[in-house]
Amino acid sequence: MLDPLLDKLKRFVTKDNNIEGWEEGVLKCKISYRTPAIEANSYYFGHPEWGKNYFEACHRDEKFVELWQAVINCWDGAIVVDIGCGPGNVYASLKDQCGEPSVLIGVDVSLGALKMAQQIGYTPVLADAHQLPFISGFADIVMLNACLHHCDDMAKVLAEAARLVRPGGLLITDHDPQLTAYNFWGLGLLLWQMRLPFYRLLKRGGHSTQQEQFWGLATELHHKPGDGVTFEMYNQVLKPFGFDVELYPHSHEVGAAVLQGKYGYSYWRCQIAQLLSGINPVSSKSALSLMCVARRHT
């Protein structure tokens, strides 16, 4: 079983002896410093029940598929790297629409999540996204969906992802919170904080128990009031690598219309918190996520 996996990876893995070995078909790389965020992501997404809940609930809806299909179109025969792949939701959602990559590498810090991703077609690599064990410029598509805000240093992870993209290749990120949408304060901040017991009461996905909610929130390092991704970060990191950068603020039920500048509306609780914080809830700055579609031209 390992030989085909090794054949897929050996062209792309660096020779710096960062490889620790294999475990049940997962290539394991050394993680120099296991930060609290890495530990939380490893535990939460590798949990047999919570990981399954995430797989079934997140990034699988019709509008998500419509938007990502419009961006990717077809990845038949492509070399694809999914950083922060978790249990494999992006490929599971798109495999019937976008064709079949020649190589599909999934990177995560959670061994349990990678084993789930492997079952649906990923070649799994356990590694720290801040220090990826790959050569530069080999991938046709690098994608990070709902990944950056789980990482200690978002800009560093974005730069590592950019390094992997070949000239002419595509870098896609999405479902990271836009900082300007979450600048809550005063009554708006109080309302935002009150959502957590309400979510547990409703048994909302990721919040079904106090323990699941605690560990889920521990993974979301930059999903907090006054934090998140910005236009400036994407441009400052990606343009020096030779990318043309397109950024699309959007809420989560818009679909491919996002690419035509439609950003939709946040859910009502967030709109109220925004109003109470002096944020216009129908502006692009109030859109919950900031999608990046960047093409490397050099």
Image (tube, rainbow, N blue to C red):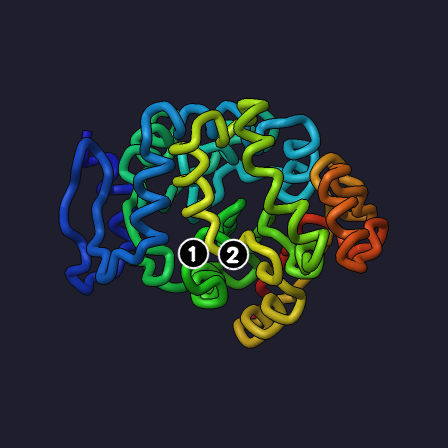
Question: For the point 48% across and 43% down, which residue is it?
Answer: 78
Q: Position of residue 280 (x, y in %)?
A: 84, 55
Question: For the point 39% across and 40% down, which residue is it?
Answer: 215
Q: Quadrant of residue 248?
A: bottom right
Q: Position of residue 93 (x, y in %)?
A: 55, 28
Residue situated in front as seen by the camera: 113 or 215: 215
Q: Which residue is mark 1?
A: 151
Q: Is residue 154 left or right of residue 296?
A: left
Residue situated in front as seen by the camera: 87 or 33: 33
- Precedes in sequence: disc 1 or disc 2: 1
Q: Are marks 1 and 2 in contact (CB under 8 Å)?
A: yes
Question: For the point 43% across and 64% down, which residue is it?
Answer: 153
Badge number at residue 222? 2
Q: Amino acid at mark 2?
A: His
Residue situated in front as seen by the camera: 10 or 94: 94
Kindly tell me whether residue 103 is visible in this rendering.
no
Badge number at residue 139? none
| 47 over 147 or under it: above or below | above
Kindly tell me whether residue 125 is visible in this rendering.
yes
Label 2 CA crowd tier, 10 Å (few <14, some 14–19, many 20+): many
The secondary structure type at the circle numbered 2 is loop
Q: Amino acid at mark 1?
A: Cys
Question: For the point 43% across and 32% down, which residue is it?
Answer: 210
The secondary structure type at the circle numbered 1 is loop
| 45 over 97 or under it: above or below | below
